Image: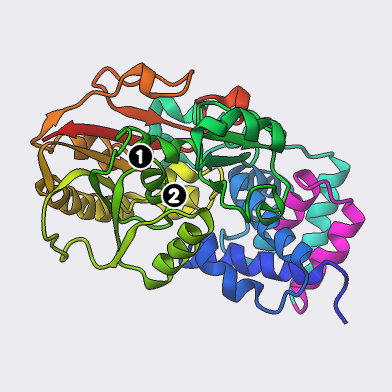
Amino acid sequence: MDVPGLPARKAALKLLDAVLRRGETLDQAAQPALQGVRSDADRALARALAGEALRWLVDLDALIDSATRQTLPDDAKPRMVLRLMLAGWLRLETPPHAVIATGLPLLVGGPRRLAHGVFSALVKGPASLPAVPTLPAAVVERWGERAAAIAVGLAVPPPLDLTLRDPAATAEWTARLGGISLMPGHVRLERGTAVERLEGFRDGAWWVQDLAASLPARLLGAGAGRRVLDLCAAPGGKTMQLAAAGWQVTAVDAGAKRLQRMQENLTRTGLTAQLVQADALLWEPDELFDAVLLDAPCTATGTCRRHPDVLHRIGARQIAEMAELQAALLRRAAQWVKPGGRLVYATCSLEREEGEDQAERVQLAPDPVRSKDLPAGIEPTSRGTIRTDPAILSDFGGMDGFFVARWSA
């Protein structure tokens, strides 16, 4: 019979292994890793343990190395287990005796005495983590002078952002949900409440969407019945924003399951859009659109505060592959805008190759973003584009990293 809490630790170990050895995302690894974990609490604990281990990986490894005579290989099972044990103790405040009781069984037939000795030595130290996570060296090299500020925004998981179907009801929903609002149509809540249990969920009054992710669709303004193309539309937050703003939306995405989820959310919110399952590199529209929004597939490094696996999975190869795909999609998207229409390009990436470098290739006339288009505390760049990162609005919980640019045809 399993020790209470042990199934969660076994699942967390599988998650960590899938990310660090096989390069999978936490979401990709979740279904097989959590299979057989019956309790919702244990499933949440497994995700939290793996997430915190990845968020603080560099610092946890430094602690482990300080207490071992011979350096353990990065992918050695004792190191993996110790990462989780330390994350449980130092980040989730699990008592050391409970950490030992649920951690050492993960090393059955292995060096349990080594892991026990290292953990006990660190507890007696006592060990501690810095106030801000240390980023991997390769990430610091890519992000340059922004890296230190971004790291501050990674210290804790992000709050919960909601986009309202009716921006005019912002004050009402902010009060009803007990949150804060950083711009019309937005409510921010503390983490911890199940989304499905929040007031307004069943009625479709809002949907979950990071504040930064809501900015691209806002740049197109009111639709007034005009036609807009939302490319690579899943998971659908921008499609719902556009539909709520009065646009006739054609939403294109290659994933059948993602489109099914989009339709469920459209039904819940009472909004409508034409959903098209197609590869945007092969699909051709029947006519041009008044506006096109391309939220392109990307490395998603801008989501590092909620998906810390990107800090360790993403490198030059993945960035180059995504940049090539983005360039191809952007060339096609620019051809489908009516004269006088608008094109908006966005990625949730902190990499220049996926943002600024892509924008420089577009042959349309820049339509600079203005301060009044953005929440207080966010300013457009000198070139009229948007560059957000987790350090922005840090006093209010931060935001994801996005690049957004706009042009007129």
Name which residue lies at 44% across and 64% down: 263
**Quarter of the C terminus within the rendering:** top left
Q: Amino acid at mark 2?
A: Gly
- Callout 1 amino acid: Ala
Tell me if residue 86 is in the magenta stretch: yes
Q: Residue 182, position in %: x, y?
A: 55, 26
**For this rendering, which residue is in front, 220 or 301?**
220
Q: Position of residue 201 (x, y in %)?
A: 63, 52
Report the Cα–Cα distance between label 1 and label 2: 9 Å
Circle 1 residues within 10 Å: few <14, some 14–19, many ≥20: many
The mark that comes first in sequence, 1 or 2, is: 1
Instruction: Give the residue number, with chain letter if any, for mark 2.
Output: 237
Residue 218 higher or lower than 383, as above or below: below
Disc 1 to disc 2: CB gap under 8 Å:
yes
* Residue 374 image position (x, y, % from top left): 41, 24
Answer with left or right where residue 204 lies relative to residue 67. left
Quadrant placement of the N terminus: bottom right
Circle 2 packing at 10 Å, graded few (<14), some (14-19), many (20+), is many
Is residue 195 visible in the rendered structure shown here?
yes
Observer able to see residue 23:
no
SS for tag 1? helix
Q: Main secondary structure of the magenta part?
A: helix
> Looking at the image, which residue is at 30% across and 39% down?
223
Identify the residue shown where x is 58% and y is 68%: 30
Judging by the rendered image, the residue that carries numbered circle 1 is 217
Q: Is residue 235 found left or right of 63 in the rendered image? A: left
Extent of the magenta region? 84-109
Q: Please, which residue is most extreme toward the front here?
A: 225
Whether 119 is among the magenta residues is no
